Image (cartoon, rainbow, N blue to C red):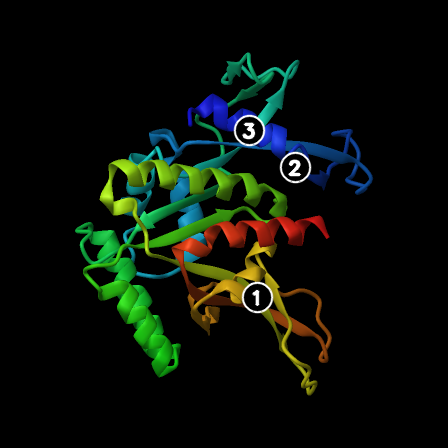
Amino acid sequence: MSTKNKQRKMNEEESDDSYSSDSSGDDNEAYTGNEVIQVEFEGRNPMTSDFHGIRQLLHQLFLKSDINLSELADIVTDQNFIGSVVIQSFLDGEDDEDSDDDENTGTNFDSSGTIFGITTAVNISKSQSHGCIEDIRKHLQSKCDQFAQPEVKQAFDNALNDDTKQTALLINERFINIPPQIAVPLLENLQKEIARAAVKKEKFRFNSYIMIVKFSRKKSKGKQKDQPEDIFSNGEEEILDEYADTSFEYSAERETDSTLSGNWTESDSTLVPHRKVVIFDATKLPFVIDAIKELISE
């Protein structure tokens, strides 16, 4: 799908793909929290100029790992027929000297602006020779060895090391506060692009997807022993447990500079970053997308 067509599709299907943030309307007045700014987002295929924005998003997923994120970002931009980056769109009438005009959609977009999200799939099968792919495989294998149950380890070993299987890392990263509604057109476009690529290239005939899901868990600072409450960074990813063939999780507290905290009392909780690594059969992706649609419509 061309860049313009993809933008048009997202605007039509997800007219509410925006989030609101509060901002003062007067530069001379203190922020009051009563003003609202509407920001519209849309997707297009990755471009070489997106390298730094994509790398930044990959860093928030992999944190202090030894993965060569620069090489991984290059792979994402090189396979520009797969996946989408999320950018800010501009309505007609808004002035932006650096933006390109799409007369068919009535919107402008900055081809080298901030990248707010990335949704794509990267082949991490054993047959792939890139150094960063080997880094990812070692990273997943190490975490699996440390935190997974024996039967879970076997499932991941099969997905990562079976020469007859094609396994993809499904990447779905974006800035905080961008709502889950945007995930639907991004994943639907990805599904169609993978299907088209699979007709021409064997490496996109995926048997399974592995995904690293980010969530935070409340950690008690006092004596309370409440059931842990998990808060998912991307709300739609909570449903992946239902469709996962298997999974394991681990704390990422030591891999981050700090946990999310505030003005806590002794009985309050702080949010500790975690990761959940899930694997699911590639044929389940349409059902995952349908479940996300149902979730965000509630």
Give coordinates of residue 189: x percent, y percent: 47, 37
Q: Give the amino acid type for the residue marked by disc 2 in the picture.
A: Ser
Judge depth for marks 2 and 3 and give the one in front: 3
Q: How many marks?
A: 3
For this rendering, which residue is in front, 159 or 182? Answer: 159
Q: To which residue does mark 1 refer?
A: 216
Label for residue 9?
Answer: 3
**Label 1: few (<14), some (14–19) or many (≥20) C-alpha neighbours in 10 Å:** many
Q: CA distance from mark 3 to mark 1?
A: 33 Å
Give coordinates of residue 14: x percent, y percent: 63, 35
Q: Quadrant of residue 248?
A: bottom left
SS at badge 3 = helix
Q: Earlier in the sequence, mark 2 or mark 1?
A: 2
Q: CA distance from mark 2 to mark 3?
A: 15 Å
* Residue at 44% over, 25% down: 3
* Residue at 70% over, 48% down: 297
Judge depth for marks 3 and 1 and give the one in front: 3
SS at badge 2 = strand
Q: Give the amino acid type for the residue marked by disc 1 in the picture.
A: Ser
Vertical relation: 76 (above or below) 240: above
Give coordinates of residue 81: x percent, y percent: 35, 33
Q: To which residue does mark 2 refer?
A: 18
Taking the image as shown, residue 52 lies to the left or right of residue 159, namely: right
